[in-house]
Image: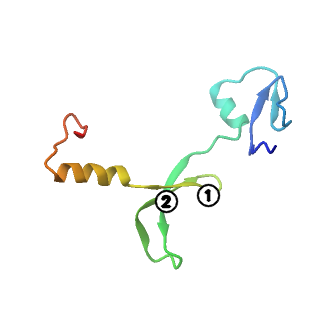
């Protein structure tokens, strides 16, 4: 069975797949992110047509800022739902839509 591990760390006991960096004691959260290879941020980027001239409306790519890996594609679905509810005379109360 494949471990599907990109990067990780473990404390003392080696995991079944044998991958990762060994540490003797549990690190603090900042060190844990670094040791696990998770010291990166997610940024949203426009999804463009092949020729790069037009952004595709309603879609964004969630991208890792360190290497540009695309982590997933998201839509503005929630925004469209809220707009549809408001257009039906359903006002928001305390910032929340009525359902």
Element type where label 1 sits in the image: loop
Closer to the chain start, of discs 1 and 2, is: 2
* Residue at the left extreme of this rendering: 89
Q: Residues within 10 Å of mark 1 (few under 14, many from 20)?
A: few
Q: Tell me the number on the disc at residue 45.
A: 2
Q: Where is residue 30 in the image (x, y as percent from the top left)?
A: 64, 30
The one nearer the camera, 86 or 28, is: 86
Q: How crowded is mark 2: few (under 14 residues within 10 Å), some or many (20 or more)?
A: some
Q: In which quarter of the image is residue 20?
A: top right
Q: Is residue 29 left or right of residue 14?
A: left
**Mark 1 = which residue?**
68
What's the image's color scheme?
rainbow
Q: Residue at x 69, y 36 (%)?
A: 34
Q: Quadrant of residue 97?
A: top left
Q: In which quarter of the image is the C terminus?
A: top left
Say above or below: 31 vs 86.
above
The one nearer the camera, 41 or 11, is: 11
Q: Tell me the number on the disc at residue 91.
A: none
* Residue at the bottom extreme of this rendering: 51
Say above or below: 5 vs 88.
above
Q: Position of residue 86 (x, y in %)?
A: 19, 49
Element type where label 2 sits in the image: strand
Q: In which quarter of the image is the N terminus?
A: top right
Q: How many marks?
A: 2
Q: Which residue is drawn at 22% across and 49% down?
A: 85
Q: CA–CA distance between discs 1 and 2?
A: 10 Å
Q: Where is residue 14 in the image (x, y as percent from the top left)?
A: 85, 28
């Amino acid at each position: 069975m494949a471990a599907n591990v990109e990067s990780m760390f473990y404390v003392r006991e080696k995991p079944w797949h044998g991958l990762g960096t060994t540490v003797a004691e549990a690190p603090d959260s900042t060190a844990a992110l670094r040791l696990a290879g998770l010291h990166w941020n997610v940024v949203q980027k426009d999804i463009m047509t092949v020729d790069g001239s037009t952004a595709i409306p309603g879609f964004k790519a969630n991208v890792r800022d360190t290497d540009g890996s695309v982590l997933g594609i998201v839509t503005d679905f929630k925004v469209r739902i809220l707009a549809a509810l408001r257009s039906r005379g359903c006002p928001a109360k305390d910032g929340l839509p009525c359902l």
